[in-house]
Amino acid sequence: MTFTAKLARSALLAVASVAAISAPIGAPLAWAGPRIKDVADFEGVRENQLVGYGLVVGLAGTGDSLRNSPFTRQSLAAMLERLGVNATNGNLNTRNVAAVMVTSNLPPFASQGSRIDVTVSALGDARSLAGGQLLVTPLMGADQQVYAVAQGPLAIGGFSASGGSGTSVTRGVPTAGRIASGALVEREVAFDIAAQQELRLALRNPDFTTAQRIAAAINGAVGEQTARAANPGSVVLRRPSGFAGDMVSLVGRIESLEVEVDTPARIVIDESSGIVVMGESVKVSTVAIAQGNLTISIQEDPFVSQPAPFSRGETVVAPSSTVDVDEEAGGLVVVPGGVPLRQLVNGLNALGVTPRDMISILQALKAAGAIQAEIEVM
């Protein structure tokens, strides 16, 4: 056996081994649909936005300029006064302090004493928050009530460096940072879900078919008349009278049920980046497509024209242009009607088109009425 034959045999054995490892054991696995918890939200179970204003100290001369940021000066003077230091008439001239906005999301059912992450962003003209320490900052909700208190050292992902000649390098955003588990929850959002007799499921992508399938899956698992589709965006869940458990038990039983989500035929196009995303339900009618590129190149080669010796002429530069036209041969490709997404993509790839050419072809198909899908341009 030659070396080439041995190498080919080794390659075949390797492919066979990979196929044997990746092949399923027994019957092929069926595609599992998404769970109810992945396609719908339970009404009342949501996050709440929190915001607060605070000060970051300990900066190495990269904080706010107190002359250009009067709110930082006022906040610094008020803080020192609460700590027993009278700095009202003093000459505050430091760049180690920065005024910041602190934001966070309060998770549903967050208990008192638990910790949440916070994001800190500079409010004034600070150059960097690296090495800073956030002082105690109350975080309020939309009702102006304090729900958490944040404090701790910042973790900055970016940096900024500059030289004496004015050269500077900046990576990321040095004026924004994050504090992991930097806020302590002080107030809980009361919501007694266990005592509820009725709950609504809000679909993240409203659809009549999906709402009916969710209701059918719940009724099949728990019992008839447990759920009903009220509209394309919500399913009403009612706890049956004979169910042994509260609403928490009912939600825990149905949220892992798998449903088949139905999506409308839609094509999303981002012309700035040339991205095309097509849904599975996109269908086309029988159509013939031709695509070809036309390239026109113009080359300028000026030359110098000199007069004969001892004549009264003068030397001039004369233009010389060469124009070439190159048009690629593009034949017609027939795409049969009613084909699924895979065959549509294969038909377009047979033309050798680029993503940007595909955008023009899809728009032309839509204008010709040969494509049954909604085109959304981002």
Image: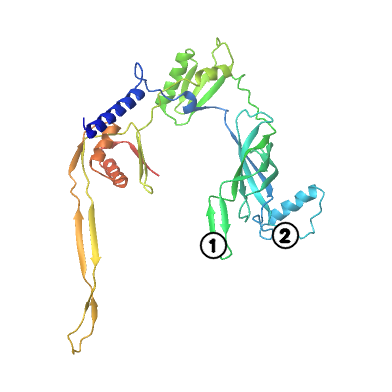
109 or 26, which lies in front?
26
Q: Which mark is residue 27?
A: none
Whether pointer 2 and pointer 1 mark residues with C-beta atoms closer than 8 Å, the reply is: no
State the SS at label 2.
loop
**Residue farthest top in this picture:** 242
Can you tell which quarter of the image residue 337 is in? top left
Q: CA distance from mark 2 to mark 1?
A: 26 Å
> Who's the residue at 72% across and 59% down the image?
93
> Which dot, 2 or 1, sits closer to the camera?
1
Residue at image mark 1: 167
Using the image, determine if residue 259 lies above or below residue 160: above
Q: Amino acid at mark 1?
A: Thr
- Residue 105 drawn at (x, y percent): 60, 36
Q: Nearer the viewer, residue 128 or 209?
A: 128
- 121 on left or right of 75: left
Mark 2 surroundings: few (<14), some (14-19) or many (≥20) residues within 10 A: few
Query: Dot 1 surroundings within 10 Å: few (below 14), some, or many (20 or more)?
Result: few
Q: Specify the quadrant that holds the N terminus.
A: top left
Q: Residue at x 49, y 21 (%)?
A: 256
Quarter assignment of residue 214 = top left
Q: Mark number for residue 93?
A: 2
Q: Residue at x 22, y 46 (%)?
A: 291
- Disc 1 is placed on an element classified as loop
